[in-house]
Image: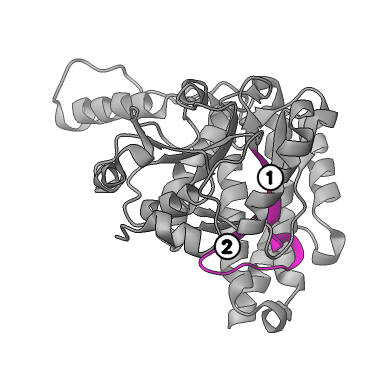
């Protein structure tokens, strides 16, 4: 670990002092078991932020030891563990000594020009802003793909004024403002962005999105469940169509297209799957317990007296739709499944399989 962070910053032209009359910014990163990445995150933040705060969700690896190495140069705050997408952000704001807070994760590294653009914007217009949208250039499995629906430069409101921005614990929509005119925006450029280094392995994606997909479904309001199912299914369907149509994509984007498409398909259809489970409203665990007990009694004469019949699974929604409902479903399917790839997702999947044979 480098002990000369301050000297390195001065050598590389980073900001190490605090100019007079400049808006101060606190850098806040939320981590859990990030011993492999947290050191570099802290080093870059010490180059420019007026305060560096690490919110540690009770890490069990060496994350805490690395933070402690920096002593009073950073603020190390330990909070109870929460799954991804379920962090309570509001109490975290109190850890900051400044009103403007730059939120980050251990997978993100901002460029020097981005930081300078943020500072310049706040110095000129900070009083009239609630938050600032920051461009993020995302990599998956080491690749950034500027192609089709995989093109991934997004803007997130990660620079916020804690007293003016609206803060809600909602996955991927944590900060907002009622007045769009009070939202600043930093335009993307190759040297003006946050490099979002996500998912080095498929396992890291699966582990992360096992939590994200479930939380996304849980936070969907009851009256929007069907609409979100249709929207996310359509998004997945569009991705699958693009995958089948662009057979020559490999020549323009390298091998990235396949892994990225599969990743986004899993994410979209995974949300649909969780929402479908929610619509059923069934306690399958209890049903399995009751069914196991009934089988045990009927087949092996073990346990309390069971009912004459095996228990049935109770669902909140009718499993057999009416003719009217089936007609609506068929119309929706015809609308969202393009005729040129005909009739069903099965044909698209078969096309992908045939592609590799």
Asked which colour scheme the image uses, the reply is one colour
- Residue at the disc numbered 1: 118
Which residue is rendered at x = 47% and y = 29% of the image? 87
Q: Alpha-carbon distance for marks 1 and 2?
A: 22 Å
Query: Is residue 68 a member of the stretch shown in magenta?
Result: no
Q: Secondary structure at mark 1?
A: helix
| Picture quadrant where residue 123 is located | top right
- Pointer 2 residue: 139
Residue 43 to residue 68: above or below: below
Is residue 233 something that shows in the picture?
Answer: no
In the picture, residue 98 is in which quadrant?
Answer: top right
Q: Position of residue 93 (x, y in %)?
A: 51, 25
240 vs 167: above or below: below
**Up-down: is 224 above or below 307?**
below
**Which structural element holds mark 2?**
strand
Residue range (magenta): 134-158
Q: Residue 56: where, in percent of width, then height?
A: 36, 36
In-image side of 42 versus 345 (left or right) = left
Left or right: residue 2 versus residue 203 is left
Work out whether residue 87 or residue 357 is closer to the camera in this orientation and state it.
Answer: 87
Q: In which quadrant is the C terminus drawn? A: bottom right
Tell me if I can see residue 82 in this picture.
yes
């Amino acid at each position: 670990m480098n002990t000369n962070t301050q000297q390195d910053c001065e050598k590389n032209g980073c900001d190490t002092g605090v100019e007079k009359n400049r808006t101060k910014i606190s850098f806040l990163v939320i981590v859990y078991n990030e011993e492999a990445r947290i050191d570099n995150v802290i080093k870059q933040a010490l180059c420019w932020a007026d305060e560096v705060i690490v919110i540690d969700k009770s890490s069990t690896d060496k994350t805490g030891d690395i933070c402690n190495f920096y002593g009073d140069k950073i603020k190390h705050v330990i909070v109870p563990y929460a799954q991804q997408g379920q962090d309570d952000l509001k109490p975290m704001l109190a850890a900051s000594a400044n009103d403007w807070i730059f939120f980050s994760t251990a997978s993100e590294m901002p460029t020097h020009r981005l930081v300078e653009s943020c500072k310049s914007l706040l110095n000129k217009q900070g009083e009239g802003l609630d938050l600032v949208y920051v461009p993020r250039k995302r990599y998956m499995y080491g690749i950034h793909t500027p192609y089709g629906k995989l093109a991934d430069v997004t803007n997130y409101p990660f620079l916020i004024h804690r007293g003016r921005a609206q803060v809600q614990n909602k996955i991927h929509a944590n900060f907002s403002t009622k007045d769009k005119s009070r939202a600043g925006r930093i335009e993307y450029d190759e040297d003006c962005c946050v490099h979002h280094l996500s998912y080095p392995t498929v396992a890291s994606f699966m582990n992360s999105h096992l939590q994200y997909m479930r939380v996304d479904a849980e936070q969907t309001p009851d009256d929007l469940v069907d609409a979100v199912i249709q929207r996310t299914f359509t998004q997945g369907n569009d991705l699958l169509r693009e995958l089948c149509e662009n057979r020559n994509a490999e020549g323009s984007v390298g091998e990235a297209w396949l892994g990225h498409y599969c990743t986004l398909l899993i994410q979209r259809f995974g949300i649909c799957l969780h929402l479908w489970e929610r619509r059923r409203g069934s306690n399958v665990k209890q049903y399995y317990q009751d069914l196991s007990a009934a089988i045990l009694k009927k087949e092996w004469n073990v346990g309390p007296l069971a009912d004459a019949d095996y228990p049935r699974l109770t669902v909140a929604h009718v499993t057999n739709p009416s003719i009217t409902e089936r007609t609506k479903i068929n119309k929706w399917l015809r609308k969202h499944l393009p005729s040129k790839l005909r009739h069903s997702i099965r044909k698209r999947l078969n096309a992908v399989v045939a592609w590799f044979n």
